Amino acid sequence: MTIVQTTSVLVDIAQKTRQAASLLAVLSTEEKNQAIEAIAQALESEKDEILQANVADCQAAAADGIAKPLYKRLQLDEHKLRDAIAGVRDVGKLADPVGQVQIYREIDTGLILKRITCPLGVLGIIFEARPEAAIQIVSLAIKSGNGVILKGGKEAVRSCEAIVKAIKQGLSHTRVNPDAVQLLTTREEILELLQLDKYVDLIIPRGSNSFVRFVQENTRIPVLGHAEGICHLYVDRSADIQKAVAITVDAKSQYPAVCNAIETLLIHQSIAATFLPIVAEALQAVNVELRGDQRTLEILPNLASATESDWETEYSDLILSIKIVDGLEDAIAHINNYGSRHTEAIITEDIKAAETFLGLVNAAGVYHNCSTRFADGFRYGFGAEVGVSTQQMPPRGPVGLEGLVTYKYQMTGDGHIVATYTGANAKSFTHQDLS
């Protein structure tokens, strides 16, 4: 682990965030919802300034030769901003995850145990170029009672500054202290943030597998990894060809720069000769570059050849690798070997094959006869998401409000002591769940 000396400036920021978060944690649902609506209104009021800041970011990024997929993520037009603001209001409509009683139990007469949900505290979120992610993250943090320290991609610094400025303006008229939301703007601050285990309770890095590993190796703070998405679509021998073509085109081309777009298409060998020419024509019509394994090239010899590295690559672009497999077992083995545990899908009319796929594929999302592009907090009805967790432990998949709370045990007695329940004349516990 790299030890970095944190500056007094960053420590001061973290302390202010923690103080504001402690007050936010005890606000009522109504007070938090008022703050969320104030954020939405402030973003609407500052729309022109936010969009102008994004234009400046995009121009600067283009001059620096930014990669095409990253540029697509960076762009924030009026429609994206409108949808992000709608997502803020959707979060306001969700049930409050704080204060939910999970266990209500009588340990003995007059001795009552409760397990109640509560905020995590302060979240440190490091995310890629998408500036609207800041909007989603803040709304979820406020609703779940958490403070948040944001670090966006360097390409989006102007956009993030304009967004956070608007959010703070909105919060200034509510019971939520604007210090609950902070923005870091330099790369050096990332390493400093990772040393603040005294003030920050969870780090959520959104980026490549290598970046997530870097974060995990350089902090004592718990890390919820949002890593890359190497997603697959398997077209089984019992697939409806029309469904399979439509889903394949959507899963690859609807928005190729995001982590829930497919990167590899797997096709059962028995339908490859029929299906491949049809799906290839549909994909090439929307400018998807196709790369095939040897069996694919025997059917479509004009395609580029896929290599071993293609199976391990998140293109985030209009590129798709294709592999013909012997069957369901072969497809599952390939996915579990090369997949990133994000989202995987099967197209089939064979219910038994679908159930086998859903049961044996190891991923946060396993789909049957639908596009992987549905792997999204907004589409799941979470209002928004702070990221998509590809780790094995929960929370897993799109992380909404439920992934941003923990719980505490509260016990109330009337002079009860443990000695009463030990020794020769020990009294028994009642252990009765209460309604």
Image: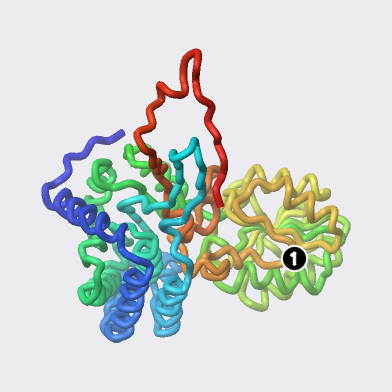
Which quarter of the figure is the N terminus placed in?
top left
Q: How is the image coloured?
A: rainbow
**Residue at 52% over, 47% down:** 394
- The answer to whether residue 15 is left or right of residue 203 is left
**In this view, which residue lies farthest toward the top?**
424
**Residue at 86% over, 59% down:** 350
Q: Residues within 10 Å of mark 1 (few under 14, many from 20)?
A: some
Residue in the foreground of this view, choosing between 368 and 53: 368
**Residue at 79% over, 56% down:** 354
**In this view, which residue lies farthest toward the left?**
8
Q: Position of residue 408 (x, y in %)?
A: 40, 44
For the residue marked with disc 1, what is the amino acid? Answer: Asn
**Residue at 53% over, 49% down:** 390
Whether residue 179 is visible, yes or no, is yes
Find residue 401 and report its image quarter: bottom left
Q: Position of residue 16 (x, y in %)?
A: 18, 56
Residue in the foreground of this view, choosing between 79 and 250: 79
Residue in the foreground of this view, choosing between 28 and 178: 28
- The answer to whether residue 128 is left or right of residue 374 is left
Residue in the foreground of this view, choosing between 8 and 380: 380
Q: Position of residue 50 (x, y in %)?
A: 29, 79
Q: Position of residue 20 (x, y in %)?
A: 22, 59
Looking at the rendered structure, the number of numbered marks drawn on it comes to: 1
Q: Which residue is mark 1?
A: 369
Q: Secondary structure at mark 1?
A: loop
